[in-house]
Amino acid sequence: MDNLKSIDLLNSLLVINNERMIGYETAEQETDQEDLKTFFSQCKYISQENKLGLTHEIYRLGGLPDEGRKLSGNIYRIWMDIKSALTGNDRKAILDSCNYGEQVAADTYEEVLSHGLEDISNVQRTLLNAQLELLNANHYTVKGLIHLLLESN
């Protein structure tokens, strides 16, 4: 196992969680829909917890956490779509953007877990699987909210 590769992989997930925190914090502040405000707060909290676990592991490996808060192109577009939808108070557009964002986050974790096998330890794999499970639960909630919205129309 190469610690530098491990640190790099863990930092890529740290950046995703930083981006989720920025996005959900913005969404939470912008919406006036209390159920979404609560959900966005929960999503932000999960990313904060994920960040703590990843940061601890990066330090344990002798690395430095990537604390950059710049948004990558895809994630930036997602949050701009959410902000635009919030401005128009379009619940479906908000949830569609969240759905896409949650898929990007989950895909990033799955990529690390499936292609970085030789660069992450069993302890790290357990940590990442637990974090992915939380992200998937958020994603499932978003899908459920979309389904309920479509049924009511």
Image (cartoon, rainbow, N blue to C red):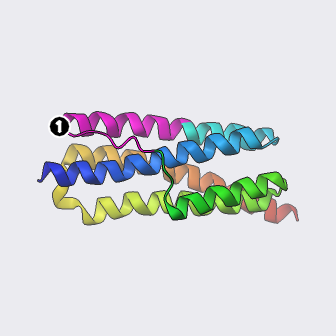
Q: Residue at x 59, y 55 (%)?
A: 140
Write the residue at 60% across / 38% down: 42
Relative depth, front residue between 36 and 84:
84
The quadrant of the image that shows the C terminus is bottom right
Residue 114: x, y in percent?
29, 64
Q: Is residue 6 above or below residue 62?
A: below
Task: Specify whether 127 is left or right of 40.
Answer: left
Q: Is residue 101 visible?
A: yes
The residue beneath circle 1 is 62
Q: Position of residue 51 (x, y in %)?
A: 41, 38
Residue located farthest toward the left when viewing the structure as drawn: 1
Name which residue lies at 15% across and 48% down. Answer: 3
Magenta residues, dominant SS class: helix
Residue 67 in magenta stretch? yes
The residue at the far right in this view is: 153
Magenta segment range? 45-68
Q: Residue at position x 49%, y 41% from top?
A: 47
- Note whether residue 134 is visible: no
Foreground residue among 120 and 6: 6
Vertical relation: 103 (above or below) 56: below
Name the quadrant containing residue 95: bottom right
**Residue 117: percent from left, percent from top:** 21, 60
Question: As drawn, is 11 to the left or to the right of 62?
Answer: right
Q: Position of residue 73 (x, y in %)?
A: 52, 63
Task: Answer few, some or many: residues within 10 Å of disc 1's Cα (few below 14, many 20 plus, some between 14 and 19).
Answer: few
Amino acid under disc 1: Gly
Q: How many numbered callouts?
A: 1
| Element under disc 1 | loop
